[in-house]
Image: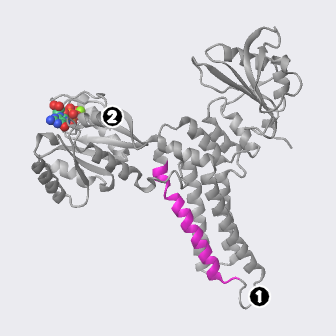
Amino acid sequence: MTDPLLSDTIAAIATAPGRGAVALLRVSGPGALAVLHRIAPALAGRPTPRTQRLAAVRHPETGELLDRALVAVFSAPASYTGQDTVEIATHGGALTPQLVLDALLAAGARAAEPGEFTRRAYLNGKLDLLQAEAVLDLIDGRSRALHRAAVHQVERGLSRRVDELRGALLTVEALLAYSIDFPEEDEPPVPPARIRAAAGDVRARIAALLATAPEGELLREGALTVLAGRPNSGKSSLFNALLGTERAIVTEVPGTTRDALEATFSVDGYPFRLVDTAGLRETEDRVEGMGIEVARRYLAAADLVLFCSETGADLDPDERGFLAWMDAKRTVLVRTKSDTRSADERRLDIESVQSVHPGAVATVSVSAVTGDGLPELRTRLLRLAFGGILGEPGEAPLVTRERHARALRSALAEVEGFVDAMDSGVPMEFAATHLRAAVGALEDLIGVVSADDVLDRVFGDFCVGK
Ligand SMILES: Nc1nc2c(ncn2[C@@H]2O[C@H](COP(=O)(O)OP(=O)(O)OP(=O)(O)O)[C@@H](O)[C@H]2O)c(=O)[nH]1
Ligand SMILES: [Mg+2]
């Protein structure tokens, strides 16, 4: 039976609003050609699919000429949505596309909801859910690294990997079913050790894919990198130097920065959100005190912290306390204003702070004035935030959404439940329910069958016309 969501004909402007040479309108549904004929009567009959034709576009009721447009027809099922689809390239700008859309609606189409074209593509089996999400990333993604991962995923990179895992689980299920069917044999047809080893192998493969999730998810928002340290330690100067613009105010007066200031930058295409904060100290000043509160909140949420202190200055007990409290894996101790010291002094300085924190916190000396040490700092940030997935998006699938991570975690827990059940002698029939549940979690991930609310969540984020 046809899905009711597919039975009417939808239309939308697919290009972004604003001044531009060309705009694209899309129509999809069983009535797409009928709608086209009403606004472009000259194209009567069935135009050759996948061939652009220039045609006069008119309002179906008034007959007014609205534009001359290039029209292409894609016949079902060979179209993006899998339905009869018409694409109309009109002149761009504020008015023409809107007037042509009005004409399409007057001719019998309905205005499409956000993401409805891609939702139809999914419902018609043109894309799986992972690919549909990747389409959204191609449109919304701001970093080169997320773009790479999305292109790979639209090509079914992640889907293929999940299919393989699902196939491997089905094999374990089949081996198990064989053993369950012949319970009386003295020698079980498939040795339990073999089933267990096969399950252990899938478990390791799911875990490896899941391990890309924390960093994969950072590709979307960027790694939250917070500058912290005493007033006047050079945080705002470093903020500006990393961004390459004079965004933050810099003065010699301690306590210059009051509020948190946020900006984005990237290293080798990997995204970071950089936050400059008020210097940390006890203060009577209410406004500054509030800024420090904000800084603490950012620190709690930070993926990385750049803790700034001046080259050559001893760390006081508060600073040492702060460093001891921070997670060493996400903290860089930045020794600032390195241009004020000689090369020898800089080297000795790094050695002496490292002896205070042996191996605990990465230490880099930088100068916002000369740019010295900035490349090293950038490389450090890249490794700390994205070390696990560096260079991978081109070839290996990445888990880039919490939805993916959740499904994989649940599949992993079920496979572990299966292995535990086998080890503790639970009857095979019961152990098998874990495998079924693991297969189910992977199928949810690809979207083999998906509940409407899941689809609403995935497609609700799309723009109209996609
Ligand atoms: N020579 C030199 N001076 C620097 C460098 N970085 C910062 N300064 C100076 O140090 C002072 C403080 O710099 P800021 O960047 O405002 O320091 P801050 O940590 O943001 O200070 P607050 O906002 O008050 O917490 C200013 O006078 C800067 O010009 C540097 O790399 N070299
Ligand atoms: Mg500042």
The answer, for residue 167, to whether it is visible in the render is yes
Is residue 391 located in the magenta-colored stretch of the structure? Answer: no
Kind of residue indicated by mark 2: Leu
Number of the label disc, if any, that sits on residue 243 = 2
Instruction: Tell me what residue is drawn at x 65 percent, y 38 percent.
Output: 459
**Looking at the image, which is closer to me, 175 or 292?**
175
Which comes sooner in the sequence, label 2 or label 1? Answer: 1
As measured in the structure, the alpha-carbon distance from the residue carrying label 2 to the one carrying label 1 is: 71 Å
Residue at image location 49% in from the left, 48% down from the top: 217
Mark 2, residues whose alpha carbon is within 10 Å: few (<14), some, or many (≥20)?
A: some
Image side of residue 316 versus residue 296, left or right:
left
Label 1 crowd bin: few (<14), some (14–19), many (20+), radius 10 Å: few
Q: Residue 7 — which label?
A: none
* Pointer 1 residue: 184
Mark 1 residue type? Glu
Nearer to me, 102 or 374: 374
Res 272 → quadrant: top left
Q: Is residue 191 magenta?
A: yes
Expressed as whole percent of the image width and height from the top left, the position of residue 147 reads 52, 42
Dot 1: element: loop
* Chief SS of the magenta region: helix
* Magenta residue span: 190-216
Q: Is residue 229 above or below residue 88?
A: below
- Distance from mark 2 CB to nearest ligand 1 atom below 8 Å: no
